Image (cartoon, rainbow, N blue to C red):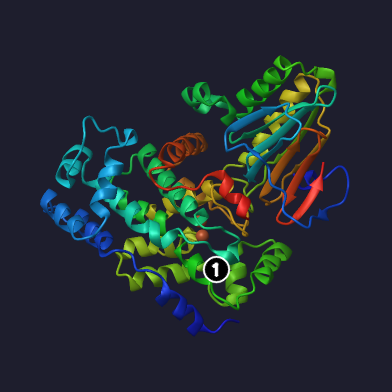
Amino acid sequence: METMIAGTAAPPKTMPKRRLGNVVVGISDMQISNRPGDLLVTYSLGSCLGVTMYDPQIKVGGLIHCMLPLSKVDPQKAASSPFMFVDTGIPELYRRLLEMGAKKNRLIVKAAGCSQLLDDRKLFEIGKRNYTIFRKMLWKNNILISGEHVGGSLSRTLFLDIAAGEVIVRVKDEEVIL
Amino acid sequence: MIEAHKIVEGIDALPTMPIAVSRMAQALADPDAGIKDVVDIVKYEPGLTGNILKMANSAYFGSTGPIDSIHQAVTRLGMQQVFRLVVISSAHTTMAPSVSGYDMPSGALWRHSVACALATQCLAEQIGVGRAETAFTSALLHDVGKLVIGNCLGIDFAAIEKYAGDNGVPFEQAERQIIGADHAQIGAAILEKWHLPQEVVAGVRWHHEPDALEGKSPMVDLVHVADAICVSMGLGTGRDGLYHRPSSSARTRCGISKLTMEQVISRTLGAMNELADLFSLPKEEAYHAL
Ligand SMILES: [Fe+2]
Ligand SMILES: [Fe+2]
């Protein structure tokens, strides 16, 4: 988990003014967009998993904020809010993007979040489990992760810029482009 | 180190919790107390009756047919439920302000407090602890100390954050190092001053160190686990991020399984969404202000 904190691209840079998303993805929520002006954002990613998927050719993308790894803990909730769980939310994000014309071989997938409390070995390790389930799902479906900013004890904000396909992670006042 | 008198001034400047909360707590502890006592407590608190009736009539509390008096609310929802509404309604003014030292905009601490109270309630129900009102009240007020130190001029929060980060220690330990006291200690002092029951004070005092409390207490353990859940889920984290050390012994002592915790998380979020308007919880957008 320690080695997981890695912005894959550009070093952190401080922005003069705080970036504001216009499409807010709440906890256990998902948003899809193909409107070029949209900046999707989700706040306060702790142990939760934030995932962006984007097709650069048709410029359509989505952002999801999942809380828990497996839907079997609350099947009723999973039926009413599938985005709460990694195992029901991620396939839903993928399916809706394909519906909008995205193609699997063009999809760029990035992830952020999955933090842990200090010494969270026995309490619940939800961050770690969210990450493991997510990796397994992608691996089974032969999809690569092109960037991630996960682990540690940080609280993160995740953005997806629909026009440029840029994915930005903000930790406190520092921004990292994934 | 910050001078103690500044902290005392900060404590004195906080708006006091309405007396209804401690009187309700006493009434609940008294087996002879009845509906009339509750009605008497609530009716002298301006605004409280209206708020409680609004909450009692919401779909969330499952009322069948309109409730138009406190008497009716107690009959239909029960004393415990009405007590929770009294506490929620009374604590809002105190817990809603911004806490600049912790980077929490106005409403953020309130959101965290309600989340923690709901999670505590849900945990108690799952493991079958009745009479969890003490834990509920503690949970709602557990971070009240942050209001004082987080808004006290002269405290170097950047230094606290750096100390926690550099040493990999919990934020409250860094607070003790830099300020000489942490928000749990200050919080307990505040509640003592407000004459809240000792059990409620203990829940606040030990919410980060349930194992350090001599004799242990299931109520404290519940608040601790609920807080850890909320911090982890990003329900109201501030500058302290996830720099808190959860106690697995507290979880084990209460007999809370990992499965139960996940069910509680899912239910708490559901309740937060349903109660957002009723309890004046800020939306995610509020974090734009950060
Ligand atoms: Fe705390
Ligand atoms: Fe807290």
The residue depicted at 66 percent of the width and 40 percent of the height is A22
Q: Is mark 1 within 8 Å of ligand 1?
A: no
Between A127 and A7, which is closer to the camera in this rendering? A7
Q: Name the quarter where the C terminus of chain A is drawn.
A: top right
Task: Name the spot of residue B186 as percent of width and height, x first.
Answer: 46, 71
Task: Name the spot of residue B137 as percent of width and height, x first.
Answer: 35, 55
Task: Name the spot of residue A20 as percent of width and height, x first.
Answer: 69, 47
Residue B214, relative to residue B250: is it above or below? below
Chain of residue at mark 1: B
- Can you identify the residue that label 1 sits on? B150
Task: Name the spot of residue B227 as percent of width and height, x first.
Answer: 49, 51
The residue depicted at 60 percent of the width and 78 percent of the height is B154
Q: Residues within 10 Å of mark 1 (few under 14, many from 20)?
A: many
Secondary-structure class at tag 1: loop
Q: Name the quarter where the N terminus of chain A is drawn.
A: top right
Count the marks: how many? 1
Q: Would you identify the image quadrant in which residue B74 lies?
A: top left
On the question of residue B125 being in view, the answer is yes
Residue B65, relative to residue B221: is it above or below? above
Between A59 and A168, which is closer to the camera in this rendering? A59
Q: Is residue B137 left or right of residue B272?
A: left
The residue depicted at 44 percent of the width and 44 percent of the height is B119
The residue depicted at 48 percent of the width and 50 percent of the height is B111
Q: Is residue A158 left or right of residue B153?
A: right
Between A18 and A49, which is closer to the camera in this rendering? A18
Residue B13, relative to residue B223: is it above or below? below
The amino acid on which the numbered mark 1 sits, given as a three-letter code, is Gly
On the question of residue B233 being in view, the answer is no
